Image (cartoon, helix red, strand yellow):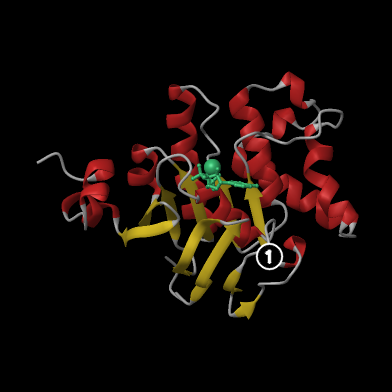
């Protein structure tokens, strides 16, 4: 966490229904500035839905979302100051890596020399300088995911949202990129909200883990606390100490 330590993302009494099905139920979550929060839970528990609500990709049924103190509940995704990295890389196949990184910035009217600086910085941080003139088809899975992270990085956002960014990678790459994401967070000190169903990822990355089940946060605590003092059987079974 940063020294400032204000609230970065505040989710208040958020509910989301798909038709008659309640997917998120009166959910509350305050994320501190610079904090690394992991949303952990089994498939179908509502992790992606919650992330998409924060990103503004889904309209919520009830409640409010604040980012840096501003009510963004009805703001467009592009106006929320967030960058999102998905499980599938969602790169433009016909564009080079450099164009993939610059595209959104050009659309937003950012000056050319500023774009060049941002790309150079992101490429250095993510070690993708040698790949800038390649197209996505000529990249490995890990390289593509670095570029996908780079696209969030060049936008200079306060909050990064990750939806299972490593789940398409093999175990070795997953472990490598896990370390890189941790280092990236140390370097940028920005707020990260990271969705996964992988307990090891959650334990190694998180300042705090929100364990979810059925659209409800069961426990929100530091990894060691959750491991040593799970609040219920579900959390214990999912992540608790084997003792
Ligand atoms: P997770 O990311 O934790 O695996 P999701 O957020 O994707 O879970 O989904 C939570 C629940 O909402 C699931 O039961 C899923 O079937 C349901 N759901 C997700 N998207 C839709 C949709 N567009 N319409 C109806 N139900 C949906
Ligand atoms: Mg999901």
- Of 42 and 157, the residue lying toward us: 42
Task: Tell me what residue is drawn at x 75 percent, y 46 percent.
Answer: 119
Percent x, y of residue 43: 46, 39
Which residue lies at the image location 77% right of the left edge and 52% below the top edge? Answer: 117
The residue carrying pointer 1 sits among few (fewer than 14), some (14 to 19) or many (20 or more) residues within 10 Å by Cα, namely some
- Is residue 207 among the parts visible in the rendering? no
Image coordinates of residue 172 in percent, x first then y, are 44, 23
- 8 and 105: which is toward the camera: 8
Horizontal side of 229 relative to 32 (left or right) equals left
Count up the numbered dots: 1
Of residues 233 and 56, the one nearer the viewer is: 233
Name the residue nearer the viewer: 58 or 185: 58
Quadrant housing residue 3: bottom left
Q: Secondary structure at mark 1?
A: loop
Up-down: is 36 above or below 147? Answer: below
In the image, is 10 to the left or to the right of 234?
right
Please, is residue 144 above or below residue 46 in the view? above
Q: From what the image shows, is residue 182 above or below residue 171?
A: below
The image quadrant where one finds the N terminus is bottom left
From the Cβ of disc 1, is ligand 1 less than 8 Å away? no
The residue depicted at 34 percent of the width and 38 percent of the height is 200
Q: Position of residue 206 (x, y in %)?
A: 38, 52
Q: Residue furthest left?
A: 243
Q: Disc 1 marks which residue?
A: 81
Residue at 89%, 54% in the rendered image? 107
Residue 2 position within the rendered picture, expressed as x and y whole percent measured from the top left: 45, 68
Query: From this viewpoint, is residue 19 visible?
Result: yes
- Quarter of the image with the C terminus is top left
């Amino acid at each position: 966490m940063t020294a400032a330590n204000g609230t970065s993302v505040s989710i208040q009494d958020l509910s989301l229904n798909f038709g008659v099905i309640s997917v998120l139920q009166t959910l509350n979550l305050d994320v501190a500035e610079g904090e690394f929060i992991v949303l952990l839970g089994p498939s179908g528990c509502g992790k992606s839905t919650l992330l998409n609500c924060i990103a503004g990709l889904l309209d919520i049924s009830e409640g409010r979302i604040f980012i840096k103190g501003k009510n963004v509940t009805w703001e467009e995704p592009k106006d929320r100051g967030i960058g999102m990295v998905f499980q599938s890389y969602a790169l433009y196949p016909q564009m080079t890596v450099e164009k993939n990184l610059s595209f959104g910035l050009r659309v937003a009217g950012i000056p050319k020399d500023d774009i060049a600086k941002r790309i150079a910085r992101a490429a250095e941080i993510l070690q993708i300088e040698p790949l800038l003139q390649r197209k996505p088809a000529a990249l490995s899975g890990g390289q593509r995911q670095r570029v996908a992270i780079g696209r969030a990085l060049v936008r200079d956002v306060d909050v990064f949202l990750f939806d299972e960014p490593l789940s398409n990678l093999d175990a070795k790459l997953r472990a490598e990129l896990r370390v890189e994401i941790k280092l990236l967070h140390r370097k940028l000190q920005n707020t990260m909200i990271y969705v996964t169903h992988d307990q090891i990822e959650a334990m190694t990355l998180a300042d705090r883990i929100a364990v979810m089940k059925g659209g409800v946060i069961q426990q929100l605590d530091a990894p060691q606390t959750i491991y040593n003092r799970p609040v219920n059987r579900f959390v214990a079974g999912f992540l608790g100490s084997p003792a």
